Each structure stands twice: as structure tokens, then as C-alpha cells.
Amino acid sequence: MILLPPRVRVPTVAAPFLFLLYGALRLVDGLGGEHGPGFVRNVGTPWSSSVS
């Protein structure tokens, strides 16, 4: 068995968890029925007040 360095192992384990978290946030964000930029989209652009 090849032991990978931590800089490879940590992202390999964290990536699926982060994708699941993102998907859950998208699901919760869309439950309000509002169409348009919601909380999840705005989190990705905190420095911009206008999202196109």
C-alpha cells in the first residue's frame, strides 16, 4: 500500500464532504421558492455587491 503525503490525503478526504455540504446548502437555499441569487451564491462573492 502506498502512503500518500498529507497534502494529498487531506483534500482527497475533504473534497467529497465539501461537495455534499455545498449540495445541501443549495437544496436548503432553494426551498424558499425564490429564484435568483440566494445565500449560497452570495457567499462565493462577498467582495461584490452586484452579481451579474
Image: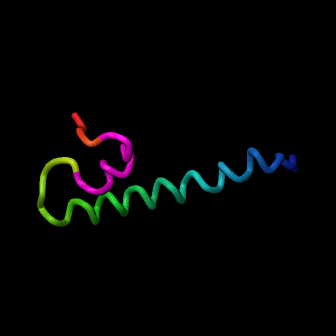
Q: Where does residue 49 sit, x and y in percent of width and height? A: 27, 42
Q: Which residue is drawn at 37% across and 47% down?
A: 46
Residue drawn at point x = 86 percent, y = 49 percent: 3
Q: Looking at the rendering, which quadrant does residue 34 occupy? A: bottom left
Q: Give the range drawn in magenta.
A: 38-48
Q: Position of residue 16 (x, y in %)?
A: 54, 54
Q: How many marks?
A: 0
Left or right position of 17 against 8: left
Image quadrant in which the C terminus is located: top left
Q: Where is residue 13 in the image (x, y as percent from the top left)?
A: 65, 56
**Residue 23 falls inside the magenta stretch:** no
What sort of colour scheme is used for the picture?
rainbow
Residue 32 horizontal/vertical position (percent): 15, 65
Image vertical order of residue 48 relative to residue 12, above or below: above
Q: Nearer the viewer, residue 6 or 41?
A: 41
Q: In which quarter of the image is residue 14?
A: bottom right
Asked if residue 43 lies in the magenta stretch, the reply is yes
User: From the viewer's perspective, is 43 left or right of 37?
Assistant: right
Taking the image as shown, residue 21 lies to the left or right of residue 51, namely right
Quarter residue 28 falls in: bottom left
- State left or right for residue 43 relative to residue 34: right
Residue appearing at x 28%, y 57% in the figure: 39
Please report the residue visible at 54 percent of the width from the left and 59 percent of the height from the top.
17
